[in-house]
Image (cartoon, rainbow, N blue to C red):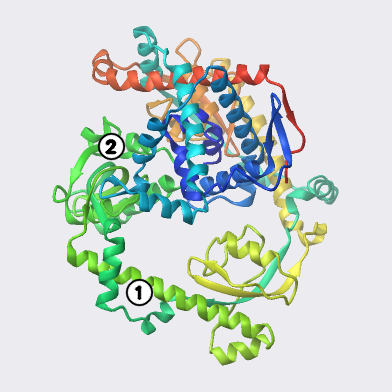
Amino acid sequence: MLKWLRKYSRSWFIALAIGAIVVVFIFWGVGSFRSPHFQEVASVNGTPILYPAYLRQYNDLIRAYQEKAQGELTEENLKALHLKEVALNRLIEEALILQAADRLGLTVSISELQDHIRRMPYFQEDGRFSERRYRALLSRLRLTPSDFEGQERQRLRMQKLIQMITGFAKVSDGELQEFFNLAREEVAVQYLVVSWRAFASRVHPRAAELTAYHQEHQAEFRLPERLRVRYLLFRPEQYESQVKVSPSEVAAYLAEQGGKLVRPAVIRVREVFLALPPKATPAQRRRLEQQAQNLLTQARAGADFLQLVEHYSQNNASRQVGGDLGYLKRGQHLPEWEKVAFSLNLQEVGLAVTPKGFHLLKLEEIKETEKLPEAEAKAMAARQLKEKKSRRLALEAAQQARGELADQPFAAVVQKLKAAVQETPLFALADPIPGLGRQRTFNEAAFRLKVQELSGVVEVPQGFVIMQCQERLPALDPPLAQVKDKVRQAVVQEQAKKLAAQEAQRLLTRLRQGQPMAKAAAQAGLPLQHSGLFTRRQGFLNHPQAFELTSAAFQLSTANPYPPQPFEWQGDYYLLAFKERRLPSPEDFRQQQAKLQEEALKYKRQLLFEAWLANERRQAKIKIYELPS
């Protein structure tokens, strides 16, 4: 997942070409460009980049990546993504694009800007632009219309420049055929796996080796700063019994918000279908369900959904078009399927279970919406009002408790409120909290506290929290005695990997000298394994991340059956041997030609834009004063 995020972390072409940046900025908010802070972090041909713009870009990137990873990103992952550098680079490149637009005299007329904003679905009611909704949403984001319109004008100018640079891209028939062959060519290999685990029992590190390793790798065993807090959680559902919603309130809510109470009427969905065999046994069903859950986890963690379709879907017709089921209305599928599909948010993935099997669904588009039937609209309005009132009561209770804690002992207030006190184990800044999960706001508020200090009221998805720090341990490098077992495991693994690498190299030498792979495998006590046919996109053993192994496999042939060296992947060493190559058929090419033309053209446009941007950067006078912390 981390490599995928790195790959797309600075793709200006993709972001601007499809308008993704607009979505991020609208929903996360960017504030006004006018700021009292004028600290320059960089300049591009004399144009300053100010700290507030950098900070907004950095925070937007963090939120976007955390959302994409479904909460899976840790602090270590975020550091590895180098988002500070990415944020600054994006601002530098934005400046280069806008300066080029100025040189070329690219402008955006008032009518163009108005049409662009009117088409934004966030500002529409009943499919039409609503000025009331437009101003209300900008007000909630603390944006004036002039600020927002200025930002959108700049983005439209950047899109115009990109279209100008990439508009002359063409893909010849020869290029398209080559693109198709690269995408659809398949190869199969035999392989051996030399695992370091098989050599671990041979390694017996001496005390001096443990001491030396510990001294050289102290950062690996460092314990981060940790806290233990106790807290009160005020859950909205605790107050639902106190909430009454009158028919007049529901009517007023429907009058004000009724236009927003809609549901999808026509959607476009992609599907990975896992068929349940007729008369499937309970064991078969459990295995299939586990596979479906694993695929759901992969998809929500950022795996390429098209690859999941290609590798796993058992619907042959839809698999040929990337799982695309086209536009669908209610009543065309089983109720269990539609309950999931029509409840998804855009680009969200869900799992539906029907008598036919398991359906991994991704909502690609909502083409049409329809008002909820009156009974459903009233029920939803009542539910939303009740949730809103309950949450307000929970907040008021938390604020009252925090006021009393200002001059009364914690235990006394807890007894008075008859509240349950919860206590965390020691946790680091990036750790999940038992019962709450991974809550960045909770952890950051906790780490601002001194021992025995109380927090303010902190909002989390489960409600509102007041916490008190009970213990704080500084980051430390533990002595060898405290982490001796971990150090021993690390030394054993390091030395066993060296032995495995040596064995893999010996085996490869024998193969290159003409020994059959089956004989080499038998002598080494290793199973001879077969990959089956796979494409470059699928990757070796259906692992797109196994870049080196996949690339090496496609360079093999009957005349050159072995790569020049073993390859390390996931800690083990792989020896490959060519088995089979299969080229796509001319008929496949003819069937896919139109779609391939679109994909190849998009790819070529991206390459053109990236080359142009790299050239602009080489010629620009860029000064970076200090990368902000």
Residue depicted at x 52% and y 81%: 397
Residue depicted at x 26% and y 50%: 341
* Label 2 Cα neighbours within 10 Å, binned few <14 / some 14-19 / many ≥20: many
Q: Relative to residue 126, is residue 55 drawn left or right?
A: right
Q: Relative to residue 493, is residue 625 drawn left or right?
A: right
Above or below: residue 354 compared with residue 119: below
Occupied quadrant, residue 509: top right
Q: Amino acid at mark 1?
A: Lys
Residue 409, horizontal then vertical, whole percent:
68, 88
Name the residue nearer the viewer: 243 or 212: 243
Residue depicted at x 25% and y 54%: 263
Could you say whether the residue bearing mark 2 is in a helix, strand or loop?
loop
Q: Which mark is residue 323?
A: 2
Could you say whether the residue bearing mark 1 is in a helix, strand or loop?
helix
Occupied quadrant, residue 383: bottom left
Name the residue nearer the viewer: 423 or 236: 236
The answer, for residue 521, to whether it is visible in the render is no
Occupied quadrant, residue 249: bottom left
The answer, for residue 180, to whether it is visible in the render is yes
* Residue located beneath label 1 in the image: 386
Q: Relative to residue 303, is residue 231 drawn left or right?
A: right
For the residues marked 1 and 2, what is the alpha-carbon distance in whole angstroms?
Answer: 39 Å
